Amino acid sequence: MPPLVFKRIPYEQLNGHQQEAYNFQKVSAVLADFGILTVPLSNDWNGADFIAQMHDGVTFLKVQLKGRLTFDLKYSGKQLYVCFRDGKGDHGVWYMYDHDELLGQLAAKGKIEKTKTWASEKPYHFPTLSKDLKKMLEPYRIPRESRTAS
């Protein structure tokens, strides 16, 4: 057999399913630094794309993987976390937030429920993050780890 040739493929050239698989692999690597194992789900079980098993071996989180900060009525009341990366490539910042908790914080500020999108029961997302949103998301930011496997 000839040797393998590895060539980077730009993210934008991947189709939607490939991008979702790519993002799952990336966030799985980030979470592994914190002893969190991930198990992909093939059918969006209860709104989740994957299960995050915490290092205590007792706590399991249902996680929906998104490309940006997103809220959806169909996720409400399901004890669901949403995970997304703000920014591109390895320089992006990952967040994982409790959907209902953060939605409640935004509702208290009147940020979503008075919009036409929310009134029509469609998903509400933020293509970019303002300074206020970044501040609100800070407790949900997954810190960068610099340790390597030993």
Image (tube, rainbow, N blue to C red):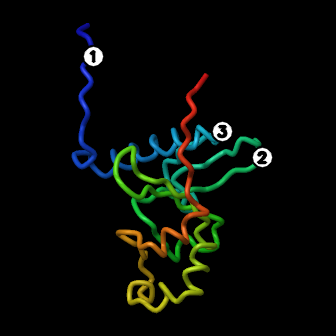
Residue at the (59%, 87%) spot, across then down: 108
- Of helix, strand and loop, which one carries label 2? loop
Circle 3 packing at 10 Å, graded few (<14), some (14-19), many (20+), is few
The foreground one among 57 and 17 is: 57
| Residue wearing tag 1 | 4
Residue at the (41%, 58%) spot, across then down: 86
| Residue wearing tag 2 | 58
Q: Where residue 58 sits: x, y (%)? A: 77, 46
Q: Amino acid at mark 3?
A: Gly
Residue at the (56%, 41%) spot, across then down: 145
Of callouts 2 and 1, the N-terminal one: 1
Q: Where residue 70 sits: x, y (%)? A: 46, 69
Which quarter of the rendered picture does the N terminus lie within? top left
Circle 1 packing at 10 Å, graded few (<14), some (14-19), many (20+), is few
Q: Quadrant of residue 129?
A: bottom left
Of callouts 2 and 3, the N-terminal one: 3
In screen coordinates, is 134 left or right of 34? left
In screen coordinates, is 128 left or right of 59? left
Extreme-top residue of the structure: 1
Disc number for residue 35 = 3
The alpha-carbon separation of the residues under discs 3 and 1 comes to 32 Å
Q: Quadrant of residue 139?
A: bottom right
Q: Amino acid at mark 1?
A: Leu
Circle 2 packing at 10 Å, graded few (<14), some (14-19), many (20+), is few
The alpha-carbon separation of the residues under discs 2 and 3 comes to 13 Å
Q: Amino acid at mark 2?
A: Val
